[in-house]
Image (cartoon, rainbow, N blue to C red):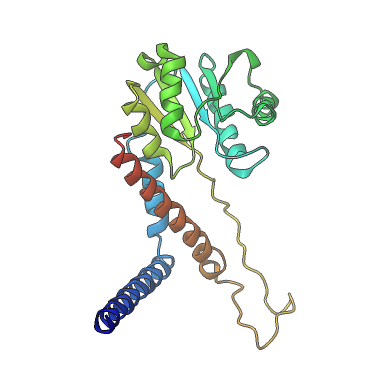
Amino acid sequence: MSGTGTKISHMLKKAFRIIFFSLGVISFTLLLFSFTRLPYDVHRWLGTHKSSYKFYPDEIIFLGGSGMPSESNLIRLYYVSELAKKYPQSKLMIVHPTDESVIADMRDELILRGVDSFKIEFEKEGTNTHDQAVNIAKDYPKLLNKHVLVVTSAESMLRTVKTFRKAGFESVGGQSAFENPMFVDLGYNFKKSGGKIYSPDVSENLALRYNFWNYLKLEISCIREFTAMGYYWMNGWV
């Protein structure tokens, strides 16, 4: 028994060493990539691949991502309102799990941005993209043969479009809620700002001050999304 226990203990230690070494390699790789534009390119690819369209949408479908107000929902609602102006004949659908106050706030935000309230429809069932697509297909079967334009986060767009097509929608395009870049010189005068002599001067190093951290966040979003895509693929939802 003693020999068996020692062997198991040795195997566990070896397994933990492999796990921690692998996690270290992955973390170091992610840190290296955050100094490149690769996270940005992957994020952009997720938001544009297979989601382009050349049709006039019959329905613009907004997929809610959080509560109200929230950064994720407000930027998506902005895109929906702009699309409503571009395609005035299209109907709009707010898709969000049943929460009357949040849905009312979303509707009011669209109305505030000039959207006709009579054009807004609702789908309140489903707590994930697959269930939402299936429920829309069930509750609005006429849309299966119509041109549908989905608005959601950039990292979720590829999975969303594939999910809607798998649910039976024949013509699906997407508008990712990308943030627009800010073309402003964010450098500053280190000495005039009271920078200490023992503190590093990063006043002109925007890559370290902003890009590095933003790309780290994009990496997490992309890793989460590829994990979700794998799960959807395993279940036959895409």
Q: Nearer the viewer, residue 44 or 195?
A: 44
Q: Which residue: 47% across, 60% down?
A: 215
Q: Is residue 107 left or right of residue 165?
A: right
Q: Which image quarter is the N terminus in? A: bottom left
Q: Is residue 198 left or right of residue 142?
A: right
Note whether residue 71 is visible.
yes
- x, y (%) of residue 73? 59, 38
- x, y (%) of residue 149? 44, 26
Q: Nearer the viewer, residue 190 or 109?
A: 109
Q: Which image quarter is the C terminus in? A: top left
Q: Which residue: 40% across, 65% down?
A: 36
Residue extending farthest to the front is 1
Q: Which residue: 46% across, 15% down?
A: 139
- x, y (%) of residue 222? 41, 52
Q: Which residue: 48% across, 62% down?
A: 216
- x, y (%) of residue 96? 56, 30
Note whether residue 52 is visible.
no
Q: Is residue 95 left or right of residue 27?
A: right
Placement of 23 over or under 82, stated as above or below: below
State the count of labels: 0
Placement of 158 over or under 171, stated as above or below: below
Q: Quadrant of residue 142?
A: top left
Placement of 187 over or under 149, stated as above or below: below
Q: Is residue 4 left or right of residue 115?
A: left
Q: Nearer the viewer, residue 142 or 4?
A: 4
Q: Quadrant of residue 9?
A: bottom left
Residue extending farthest to the bottom is 198
